[in-house]
Image (cartoon, grey):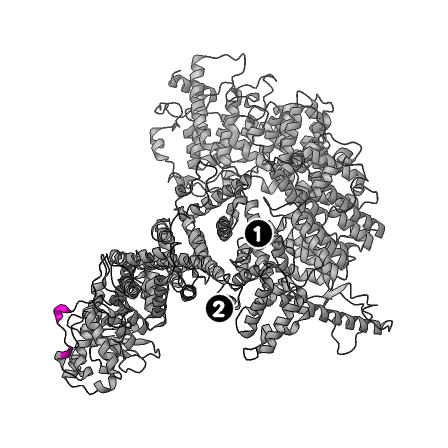
Amino acid sequence: MDRGSKSSGTSSSSGLRRGPKVKTTLAPPGDFIALGSKQRAVAAPLSDSTEPKPIIRKSVAGTKRDGLASGTAPGASLSKRSKLSSSHSFTPLGKGSESERSLHETLAVEVDSLDFVDDVLDCLDSGNDERVEGLLCGAVKHLRANRTRPDSVLFLALLYLAKLRPLVFSSEVVIDAFCSLLKRDVSYSYKSKGNVLVQTLSCSLLMAAFKDEESWPEAFIKVYMEDALGDRSWVDNEECKAFVDNILTAFNTKAPPKSSLLLQPGDTLKSYDTPSGSPSHAEDDKSADTSESAHRANTADLNNLPVLSRYHFLQDSVESLVLDIVKEQLTRRQSMDAISRNVLKLLLATCGVGEVRLLASQRLEMWLQNPKLMRPAQDLLMSVCLNCNQHNQTDVEVISHLIRIRLKTKPLINHYMLCFRELLNQHQDNLNTILKHTIYNELSTARNPNNMGLLAVIFQHFPDVAAKLLAQVFQDLLMNRDDYLRALRVLFREIVRALRHEINFPVFCQGLMVERKDSAYRDLEPALKERFLVSVVELVTLCVMLAVTPAVRESAQSRGDRRDVEALRNYQQQVALIQRDAIYWMYTTLPKMFKLGQNEYIHSLHKLLFMEQGESSHNKDNWPPEGERSLILRIASDVPLLEDTLIWILLMGLSKDLPLNAPDALELADHLVKRAAALGAETTDVLRVGRQEVIDMIFNLCAYRHPENITLPAGYTAPSLAISAMYWKAWGMLLILTAFNAQTFGQTAWEDYPMLRCFMENVMTSQYTYPPPSAVTKDNIDELRGQESQIAHLEKQHILEFESHLAAASTGAAISESNSLLLSQLMMMEPAGPARKPPKEVFEQLQKLNKLLHIGQMLCRSRKPDFLLQIIQQQGTSRSMPWLVELVQASESSLEVLPVQCLCEFLLHDITEEGEEGEEAKTEKLHKEKKQLKHRQLLGRLQTLLRDPNGNMETVQQVLSYFLKRLTSGQASVRQQAIKGLSVVLASPKEHQPEEDEDSDTEVAMDTEEDDDVTRKWLLQQLPSIALFDEVKQMVAETLRQACQVETEPSAISAYLQFLSSYMPAADMSRLAALVLDVGQLIIDRPTVMNFILPSESCRFDGADKTLAAILEIFTTYIMQARMPSKEIYSWSESQDQILLQWGSGEAATLHILVVQAMIIALTFGRPKGESCYQTLLDIWFTPDGSVPSAFLVDTSEEALLFPDWLKLRMIRANVDRLVDAALKDLEPAKLVLFVQSFGIPVPSMNKLLAALDDCLLHKHTGMDDAVLDRTYMAQLVKVQWLRGVSTGRSFYGWLSDSNADDVEMNPEEEKPVEKEGGALASVGPVKEKKEKEEEPFTVGSVRGAVARVFASELSGSEQQKQLRPLQRALAAEMRPSAATCSIAEELCTVMSGMLEGSTGAGFLASLHARTGASIPLFSVLCRIQKKSVSSVLTTFLEKIHLESKGIDSALSRFLETVMPAATSRAAGVQLSTKEGISQALAVISRASSGHELALKTIMDSCMDSTTGSSTIRSLVETLLSSPDTPMSGLLVDWLARLNPEIISLHSDVQIKLLFSGKAEADGDDEDHGSRYFTSHNFQP
């Protein structure tokens, strides 16, 4: 359509023409177009300064037009008119009054749409506000006339003005004009909504005009409600959403979320619907599209504006208006079908008004049942629930009406529950109101079937609060005059069933037991108060039983299968909490509310704890049913006991205000403790108690309290007494509590309560005796029994005295033990005092209790504190512990729970039993297989602990220390046992795999190994291979240092020293000093053992060189670190054992004197084979130039004697030149002479000694005459040394003999000594050289030389055997039966006996034990010869060598132990027919160190012979009487008493003489008396 024609047509119709203007073209659709001339388009920019401020005004006249053209007259304004009054009557269907319509129509000014914008702007510029209103009213008139097809130019012009000058639309006339467009036009069909473009335009214009206004006209509400009740043409239009939302703020309605609305968007009109049947043309469509695009862009901006409260100041009038319209609609349309859906939609929008909600709630049930109104009614129900957020009286009535709504279909019920879920969230008090009305409705006759579903919703979203509020409702009902208990029991069961047991029972019970202080309770009668409290107890008990769910019941019935015990554990914890709260209520709250009698109080207490008979639980309504009754009661009673519950019960018994006395409280507590303990503690804490005040409470309940009306005498203090039965019961309770709470009670019980400790040990060891096994020893058993008797006696005295005072104050009767009433019932109460002996029945009860509850096993499993370990340590290693074996065997699958010390002890016990097994044990194959299996399990456990790289260091230390500390024991058997245990534990698991042969011993395979190999292997090879060796090596080293001081096995000491050398703490000087001191003490204090394991010419120990190398390395490392540059001043010390050493090189060190001497002694053994630090240490102490360090005492700074005489002698005996030279330096002649007379000095050292004496004579030393006392003896000694090969001492010998040196000198070529002195031949005298020939016979005279060559020389092993063969052949000849004499054997014994008695005895004895390859064959032949022909010389010597060998650990000693008792017995049994023979036999026996009884038994056996009995016994008695100092007199008396007891009783004088007479008293009368005695009795065996 042409723009010019459009313009001309418009002008002709309007009659208002303007001058010709330049036509403007339209912009593309969707964009705003600036209408008017080009000049004005540029002159009217959109700026912020032209926008009006948001103020409340009645017209545009009060708004200044800032930012207009400069030609505008100042002060010009629009005419002021009042806005639409709120008193205007509402006319439906758009039929406004004639005055209203004529007002804006009268002012209407028609103008060409193309000139509309320019005219309006010109009028605004000129201040002609009336014409502006007229132009706008003319536009409204034009739009009404063309409602179906509005002019697009005018449409866009209005939008442009709204964008540019929104305030022009805010006058009263303009608002009225545009509101008229929002009303329905009656010219259209009722069913046709027509084109809503004009209405949406009006909404947009009004929204643009009032977007910044805080108070909107009431006219907007009227037109909204008219359209909402009508066809809802623009109310539901999306383009009008911003305008409508701001109008809805007048109702304060909380709109439901779109997701919850059931009415779909398709139920409303879409934007810009074209009415049906309206003609449509292409040009009109194009124009409509342009307007539509522009309007859509404008509304998009308006819809983004925030929604604000626009009717805050008109709230009362708005509510009155809305309420009038709603009531009119509801009262006018009485029938259900007469209500339209739009009415429900209006109610939905106005639910923010309380009266509207109330009106809607009263009719919702009817509307929900109408299929046509079901969907909007459901939305209305949701809106009503969402807006009940004030909880005033109106909302309470609304909730009451909503709860009474009955619905049948499932979808409606689900929506109903959804709405109530929202209702619960609107206000915190809504929950209480809904719950109370629901319960009351359920108890009424017109109950709603949806009540249980509603309760389920409530408890699902607010479980804890709902449970507490439900309890309050129940309390209110129980306080009613009518008895609601039965009805509430049934109702509560229904609620629990509906909720599927998803209810917080502890919270519900807490709500039931809340103290009521309101007037409603205070005004109750006493009978009703008592009924109320009893009913609360009934309901609490019912809760416990209702909490038994099917899952709990199934879990409780599954005996063996405990796969799902979580439900049962949760139930038990719930019931424990309920009982705790109930006991607290009984202790604190119930006495304040009402004072029950004793019977009612105890009955209620027992009922809450399920200790009553089963009838009391179902006597109200016969629930639980009979089939489930016993199971439910058992489940409800088997629950844990909380600490607070126990404490409240104990406090009840101690309180004087409660009707529960102390015995009943203790009995109740004891029952609960045992019942809870019977559940076991595998998966949950059934008896967790942490406060130790419980102990004092329990004992306070046991205390005896005399009647208060009895006054005791002044100055008398009653003893602390306890009732005996309760006292022992209290100990049983504490024992159970300690077992279940070992970490909290254990240490206190073990240390502070001896009686409880005694019981703990009884149940752990299963030995129910007093005193306990760990406290009993052979020394203190009588002391303990006497202590108990003394305590019992004092206790009896105190009780009798106390009872006497009580009787004197009451009856006046005299009290004694016979008539005492308290003596059998009371005892002293001293819980922390000494343990008392329990009665027999107490031990029986303790045994039953342990069998039922397994208290002992629980205490054994405790690791912190470790009771089992403490018992093991107290009983010691030498005592039998069969209970420990049973404990380990009972823990087949749980060795991890036992302490490692227990496993180690069992392993040692097992190893000990292996050595004691005989043939009988081997036949028990089944028992042996079980034992082997247990042994392998235990051994595998210990080996895993030691070799696990991720193991616990503390555990590894415990295992090792348990064995290692036994290495320091003073008993050799204990040390040997520990070594065996270590060798087994440290061995690789592969080394202890069982063999295939069933008969083979597979437990410990170490009997075939030598002890030295065992020790060396476990210590030097296996121990360093464990995972955490670096962390434990220092602990091992410290233990081995102590073990070196007590160990007697040479191989073990050698291995210890090698270990200490390999892993000594070189970086820690303090530890290294302690190690060196221990090694020094070992060398100084134990020379016998050290001489055996260190290398020497006679040493046969394989590891001697390694041992010496280890010692030298320790000493060298220490001395290298101890030496430091010398200082001028050293700190003074009081220690008398420390010396300060200073070397010529300027270095100094402070060392212990013992360490210094030990280092020198170590150097005397010479250089060991292999690598060692010998040369380094030798150079430190004895430099090559012969200098030695100087020594000073640190306490006095005086010069110290570095090398005492005994050490110098040791240095001289060494084959080290530096040591010998240092020892001989500056020696006095007396010392030299003394050293020459010593034994064991090698030939080179003797050469230097004698050379030093020659030098003294050369320098004419003055002390020579005093040094030599016996020159003859010294001369002979020098000659003997020459025979040994010494070449010096000529001058000294000449001085001794006072003759020419030529007479005594011997030709050196002829000096061929028979032997080299080994240490013991100097006292034998010179021996002439005689070359033995093998073919010459061995005579008696050759015996001495042969013995000297074999045992007193330094011959090698092969040479010794060569020298021994002639003697062995001679003895073998005498051993033959045809041999008549044994002269060689007797001579051998004589010679060896002489050597033992001489000054060389010690050296000769050591040589015999060291050279067992030669000595054992000789003694074996001697024993055989003595067996063939008993000789007193042989017997005496054998006994003598046997006695001398006592205490020496060698192969020879062990050989003599095996052969000597038999030899003594045989010697004692020969030639007993004569008095001489008896004397000889008694002499042999008296010389024996042992075997008296065995030998004397041999004599008595011979006396049993009938032919020689009398004479032999007579000879025996006479011999003993003549020599009563022999040790056999007492034994003879004992044997005679066995033969004939009458002998002793008839002749006691002879008995006394035999036992006590001296030799001087044995005269002839005694002999005659003994003869007469035997003759008269004619004694015959």
Image coords of residue 566 (percent x, y): 60, 39
The residue where tag 1 is placed is 882
Q: Is residue 952 left or right of residue 191?
A: left
Residue at x-position 60% and y-position 17%: 191
> Magenta region's main secondary structure?
loop
Figure check: 350 above or below 517? above
Amino acid type, residue under disc 2 in the picture? Ala
Image coords of residue 950 (percent x, y): 40, 46
Q: Is residue 1304 magenta?
A: yes
CA neighbours of label 1 inside 10 A, class few (<14), some (14 to 19), many (20+): few
Q: Number of labelled discs? A: 2
Q: Which image quadrant is residue 550 in?
A: top right
The residue where tag 2 is placed is 1483
Image coords of residue 449 (percent x, y): 73, 29
Residue at x-position 70% and y-position 26%: 407
- SS class of the residue under badge 2? helix
Amino acid type, residue under disc 1 in the picture? Pro
Figure check: 116 above or below 51? above
- SS class of the residue under badge 1? helix
Rounded to the nearest whole Å, what is the CA distance between mark 2 and mark 1? 48 Å
CA neighbours of label 2 inside 10 A, class few (<14), some (14 to 19), many (20+): some
Q: Which span is picked out in magenta?
A: 1303-1320
The answer to whether residue 492 of the structure is visible from this angle is: no
Q: Which image quadrant is residue 1581 in?
A: bottom right
